[in-house]
Amino acid sequence: MSMIQTIVTSLFHGHSVKTDPMPDFNLERYLGEWHEIARLENWFERGLSRVLARYDLREDGSISVVNSGYDVRTGERKEACARAVAGDAPNHLKVYFVPLVYGRYEVAFLDENYTRAVVSGGSLNYLWLLARSPQLKDDELQPMLHCAEKLGYDTSRLIYANVQASPDK
């Protein structure tokens, strides 16, 4: 990242967080559907519940990203599509929702079965706890919270998924 990008990122996104590389990260195992268990509040997901993220490999080697969730006010499903490319480590991606502007996507925690993940957006303002199933037991959640806290996140600010908020539940 250039000096200018670093300055702009810190101005708009706050204190930078850098996760450790995971040399054994297997992107193909990571692909597929993930349920948002918890997140830090952010403007682009405000008012959404039952958020899903879907990652699929594209022919050009990049990753198709589709994020969707229910608007709690209207009950309508909202969707945002993006393209992700490799970052500076196997578990780091650059996600482009608009050309030339990317968000950092860094997997900071991943269980051995690829069923639970902690994802940092590169700053203390962006954090997601994801799972292959819509709910986790407390003993499954605790290691994820511990990872987030070690990175400097205030986990008391997490918003937990409201799995009852959509009309088709």
Image (tube, helix red, strand yellow):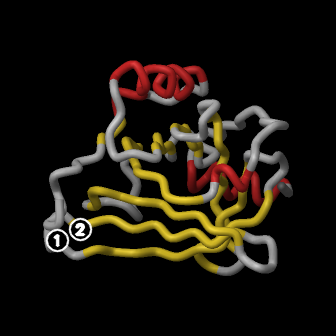
Local secondary structure at mark 1: loop
Q: Which mark is on residue 84? A: none
Residue at figure coordinates x 50%, y 43% from the top left: 127
Q: Position of residue 75 (x, y in %)?
A: 16, 71
> Dot 2 surroundings within 10 Å: few (below 14), some, or many (20 or more)?
some
Q: Is residue 138 left or right of residue 81?
A: left
Q: Is residue 55 left or right of residue 77?
A: right
Q: Position of residue 122 (x, y in %)?
A: 64, 45
Q: Quadrant of residue 39?
A: top left
Residue under label 2, please give it: 71
Q: Position of residue 133 (x, y in %)?
A: 39, 45
Q: Quadrant of residue 157?
A: top left
> Dot 1 surroundings within 10 Å: few (below 14), some, or many (20 or more)?
some
Residue under label 1, please give it: 75
Looking at the picture, tell me which residue is in the foreground, 26 or 154.
26
Q: Is residue 168 left or right of residue 38?
A: left
Q: Position of residue 153 (x, y in %)?
A: 50, 30
Residue at figure coordinates x 39%, y 68% from the top left: 68
Residue type at tag 2: Asp
Residue at figure coordinates x 48%, y 60% from the top left: 53
How far apart, in angstroms, are the residues tagged by discs 1 and 2? Answer: 5 Å
Q: Quadrant of residue 31?
A: bottom right
Local secondary structure at mark 2: strand
Q: Is residue 52 left or right of residue 10?
A: left
Q: From this view, report whether residue 107 is shown above or below residue 78.
A: above
Mark 1 and mark 2 residues within 8 Å of each other at the beta carbon: yes
Residue type at tag 1: Gly
